Image (spheres, rainbow, N blue to C red):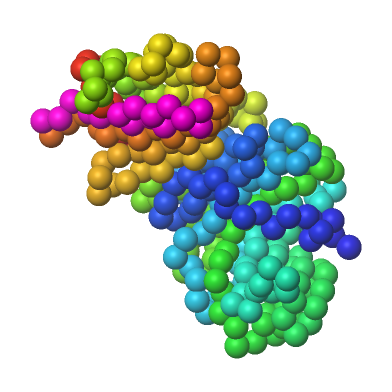
Amino acid sequence: MVGALAMLFAVPAYADGAGTVTFFKSPGADARWVHFSPPPPGDPDTWSIKLTLPTASDYAGADLNGVAGPPPSTPPSFDFYSTVTGASGGSPRLVMVFSDNTSTSPSDMSLRPLSWTSGTWTHEDGASTDWDNRGGTCGFLYEQSYSVEMACHAGKTVTDVFVVTDSAWLAGPYTHYIDNIAYGSAFITSPEESGCREGDGGGDFQDQNGHHGNVQMDNDSCEESGHGGNGDSGQGDRVDSSDRGDGKDFHSSSIQSSNYDASANTMTITGLGTSNGIPVAFTLVALETGNGGPGWVSMVFSDGYAIAGDLLDGSITLN
């Protein structure tokens, strides 16, 4: 039995991005677009999806948006690059969830490799017999063809499609790079039009009660990674404040989600950190400087403190 089918089919608890894909991950993992070299054969750009699992319980993935509906007649496929060699544990896998799926009676099928070879791109061809099935009229099936498993879900539509890796329990820590995701008419190779945005800047601000604070943010959801996966400039994403407005400092330790609202021109960042050395969760909403406005920030912390106000100096850029 492929071990990954006994593992968690990850729920997008921490979302990041919009449009082509939406990233999800456990708190300690990393999921983002990066520039990665070498690209896989046939890739028209240098972008790849990076999924990093530091511990055995971590998971990370990318949910494909706008693909729900009738399943494609052509088998899906994707390319992946692993930083380690070994048995796959069923990761990375492309999962198709069907309309009769429930929490107690799963109905899905997944395309996955049996093993990894480090330092090289592997094409996971949906026309192979690398499909596993859960539910439908067939129950559990392993190493079958796309057509065989599709027959198990006759008359059903697809409600969700995602790519996930969660095998660090077997061979972690590791990073998987995912590219050239082909699903129906979609061919996903880059974050273009996917809502991948960078938010930087900060300054001093004042709320309506006259409280003064400051904030600095460096949130680059499209960071680059070095050749071979060893570089990782994306780990620099941070939110910091030497004074939240109540005299306490704050320093983030992990960014869990980053969402850009194009209509409001705001970025919302959530994560974990410490304030005066005490662990807290936080939500930062930042409005870009421009159109006659100085920029605006709102910070809410799990210790009960919240503040919002216009920038007095500095600036916020979302691009």
Q: Is residue 315 left or right of residue 256?
A: left
Q: Nearer the viewer, residue 226 or 132?
A: 132
Instruction: Name which quarter of the figure residue 119 lies in.
Output: top right
Which residue: 10% across, 30% down?
Answer: 292
Q: In the displayed orientation, state which residue is furthest to the left.
A: 292
Location of residue 117 in the rendering, given as x and y in whole percent from the top left corner: 78, 43
Q: Nearer the viewer, residue 157 or 261?
A: 261
Q: In the displayed orientation, state which residue is furthest to the bottom.
A: 155
Q: Is residue 296 magenta?
A: yes
Give the magenta-colored segment's residue range.
Answer: 292-308
Q: Could you tell me if residue 152 is visible in this image?
A: yes
Instruction: Name which quarter of the figure residue 225 lies in.
Output: top right
Which residue: 81% across, 51% down?
Answer: 89
Q: Is residue 47 above or below residue 255?
A: below
Q: Is residue 10 magenta?
A: no
Which residue: 48% across, 53% down?
Answer: 21
